Amino acid sequence: MKKKAVFLDRDGTINKDVGYPNSYSAIDIFPYSFEAVRKLNQSGLLVVIITNQSGIGRGLIIEENLEEIHQKMREAFSRHDARFDGIYYCPHYLFSPSPEYRKNCQCRKPLPGMAFKAAEELHVDLKNSYMVGDKVEDILFGVNIGAKPILCLTGFGRESLPKLKEKGVKPAFVAKTLLEAVSWILREEKK
């Protein structure tokens, strides 16, 4: 049976956006993110991180370091009785010095590749899922996969709002924080 998921952008949504962090010590998780993810877990919705990580393709971080960051994030959330059901990232950068990462991929948000992979591996019902993020690409990703897109005003959210208006794209909801986005999702689920 297919399950609903809440796809979460990482930088600017779960934690502060500091550019291209290459170690866990550079990751500053918003304190309310633990409660937000725990509430989603308790509701039975899958929680899946979907993140563009072109820093790999740009040569600013190696994949092993990114994997370590994600493992330590999992551990930090676990200490708060919260968990991620999946973490997907796009390492590609079109102008990468490394041929391995230099590609015009289908996984870089707003393209839907990461969602399709998650849908296959985790049996996700994309059309009844949600996408929460702070960038225009996150909202367009949500639109592209047929999920309800929610803009968080953290990170680049305030800058993204007028850009979305220019494009004629309206998020299903605009939240001050991830926790407020989760409260809205849980209300939607009760309807």
Image (spheres, rainbow, N blue to C red):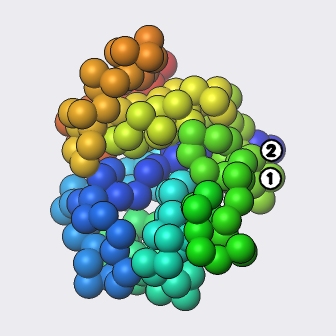
- The residue located at (44%, 11%) in the rendering is 168
Q: Secondary structure at mark 1?
A: helix
- The residue located at (50%, 78%) in the rendering is 59
Residue 171, image x, y percentages: 41, 22
From the image, tell me which residue sits under label 1.
120
Quarter where residue 142 is shown: top right
What amino acid is found at the position of numbered circle 2 in the picture? Met
For the residue pair 47 and 99, the one nearer the viewer reads as 99
From the image, tell me which residue sits under label 2.
1
**Which mark is first along the chain, 2 or 1?**
2
| Disc 2 residue crowd, few under 14, some 14–19, many 20+, Cα 10 Å | few
Residue 165, image x, y percentages: 35, 15
For the residue pair 18 and 9, the one nearer the viewer reads as 18
Residue 102, image x, y percentages: 67, 65
- The residue located at (32%, 51%) in the rendering is 13
Quarter where residue 167 is shown: top left
Question: Is 122 above or below relative to 170?
Answer: below
Query: Number of callouts in the render?
Result: 2
Quarter where residue 144 is shown: top right
Q: Is residue 178 left or right of residue 123?
A: left
